[in-house]
């Protein structure tokens, strides 16, 4: 009995291709929705008195074993000659600390001062920041369409921010500055991670990055607990554990694998397009669960941001 070729075991037949792609699109939508749930869960945790560092520790600590298992399996599949050197692993670790630790801390801390809606809108603009940084750092093309996208998106952000100041007070300025810094640093991460991912592979890169960030977050927690005399039991409180489990498994691990499968089925462009539902999902959940205000300013700002980021996606397709 002959073994079927990989093409016959994994590639969809003509009769199943529409269903195969439809499942891929649903996975892309689902991953975007679950990733977008993060802001709502963080806000709920903060409202229960859970600290930012504790939320980060539970999220990364529970997610890490899954990614480690995947990363070790990926490394074992490589021959010794094909395994990257120490500098590549060090670069991945540094990028992981930047993204999963520093950016996450800025993002979670910023959400203490602004709504989950505005947080998601600001983070959603990172493709525009990535294009701008690529122009400044790498000399890549930055067209008039990019400028229009930048103006549209941040006009939307400023519109929603104006409403936030009236609802959340002057602290909203500090909150949006922290989340914008997270988006800007994440844009740096996107630019510089690409060549490292090319050498390590996405799975192994994620494993190394997550492990390095988790070490940083654990040390941060030790310093925070020591400096503030925070009782260790607070790390294991019911709200902290509940929020951590949802953040790790529902908002991180599950959607990351759904995203990978979606990309394999429908490609990165269509997967990215499906990701545009993220801010909409966050808005709906924030209004429904957190009872955040939603009016003309939020609706108009959301539309402007979606239009701006959508323009960047179309530029990439035609460039």
Image (spheres, rainbow, N blue to C red):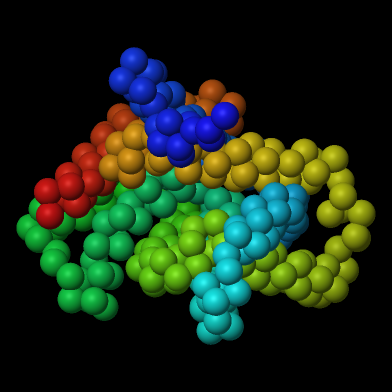
The residue at the point 67 percent across, 41 percent down is: 249
Q: Position of residue 81 (x, y in %)?
A: 55, 76
Along the viewing direction, whichever of 231 and 257 lies nearer the viewer: 257
- In the rendered structure, the answer to whether residue 77 lies left or right of residue 148 reads right
Residue 183 is at least partly visible in this image: yes
The residue at the point 18 percent across, 76 percent down is: 139
Q: Position of residue 56 (x, y in %)?
A: 68, 56
**Looking at the picture, does residue 18 appear above or below residue 263?**
above
Residue 116 is at least partly visible in this image: no
**Looking at the picture, does residue 246 appear above or below residue 213?**
above
Along the viewing direction, whichever of 47 and 136 lies nearer the viewer: 136
Along the viewing direction, whichever of 223 and 167 lies nearer the viewer: 223
Along the viewing direction, whichever of 156 and 309 lies nearer the viewer: 309
- In the rendered structure, the answer to whether residue 202 lies left or right of residue 55 reads left
The residue at the point 30 percent across, 62 percent down is: 129
Count of marks overlaid on the render: 0
Residue extending furthest toward the left: 144
The quarter of the picture where the N terminus appears is top right
The quarter of the picture where the C terminus appears is bottom left
Q: Position of residue 68 (x, y in %)?
A: 69, 58
**Looking at the picture, does residue 29 appear above or below residue 131?**
above
**Looking at the picture, does residue 68 appear above or below residue 95?**
above
- In the rendered structure, the answer to whether residue 209 lies left or right of residue 317 reads right
Q: Position of residue 9 (x, y in %)?
A: 48, 31
Residue extending furthest toward the bottom: 87
Residue extending furthest toward the front: 1
The residue at the point 18 percent across, 47 percent down is: 317
- In the rendered structure, the answer to whether residue 236 lies left or right of residue 301 reads right
């Amino acid at each position: 009995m002959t073994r079927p070729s990989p093409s016959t075991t994994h590639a969809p037949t003509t009769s199943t291709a529409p269903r195969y792609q439809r499942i891929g699109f649903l996975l892309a939508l689902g991953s975007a929705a679950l990733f977008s749930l993060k802001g709502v869960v963080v806000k709920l945790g903060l409202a229960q008195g859970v600290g930012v560092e504790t939320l980060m520790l539970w999220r990364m600590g529970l997610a890490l074993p899954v990614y480690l298992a995947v990363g070790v399996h990926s490394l074992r599949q490589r021959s010794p000659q094909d395994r990257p050197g120490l500098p590549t692993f060090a670069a991945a670790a540094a990028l992981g600390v930047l993204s999963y630790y520093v950016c996450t801390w800025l993002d979670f801390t910023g959400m203490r001062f602004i709504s989950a809606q505005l947080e998601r809108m600001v983070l959603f603009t990172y493709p525009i920041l990535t294009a701008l940084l690529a122009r400044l750092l790498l000399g890549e093309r930055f067209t008039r369409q990019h400028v229009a996208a930048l103006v549209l998106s941040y006009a939307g952000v400023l519109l929603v921010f104006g409403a936030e100041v009236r609802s959340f007070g002057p602290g909203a300025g500090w909150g949006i500055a922290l989340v914008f810094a997270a988006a800007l640093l994440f844009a740096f991460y996107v630019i510089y991670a690409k060549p490292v991912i090319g050498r390590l592979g996405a799975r192994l890169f994620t494993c190394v990055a997550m492990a390095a960030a988790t070490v940083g977050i654990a040390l941060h927690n030790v310093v925070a607990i020591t400096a503030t005399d925070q009782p260790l039991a607070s790390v294991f409180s019911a709200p902290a554990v509940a929020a951590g489990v949802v953040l790790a498994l529902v908002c991180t691990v599950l959607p990351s694998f759904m995203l990978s499968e979606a990309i394999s089925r429908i490609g990165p462009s269509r997967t990215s397009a499906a990701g545009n539902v993220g801010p909409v999902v966050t808005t709906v959940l924030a209004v429904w669960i957190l009872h955040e205000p939603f009016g003309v300013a939020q609706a108009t700002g959301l539309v402007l941001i979606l239009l701006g980021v959508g323009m960047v996606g179309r530029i990439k397709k035609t460039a």
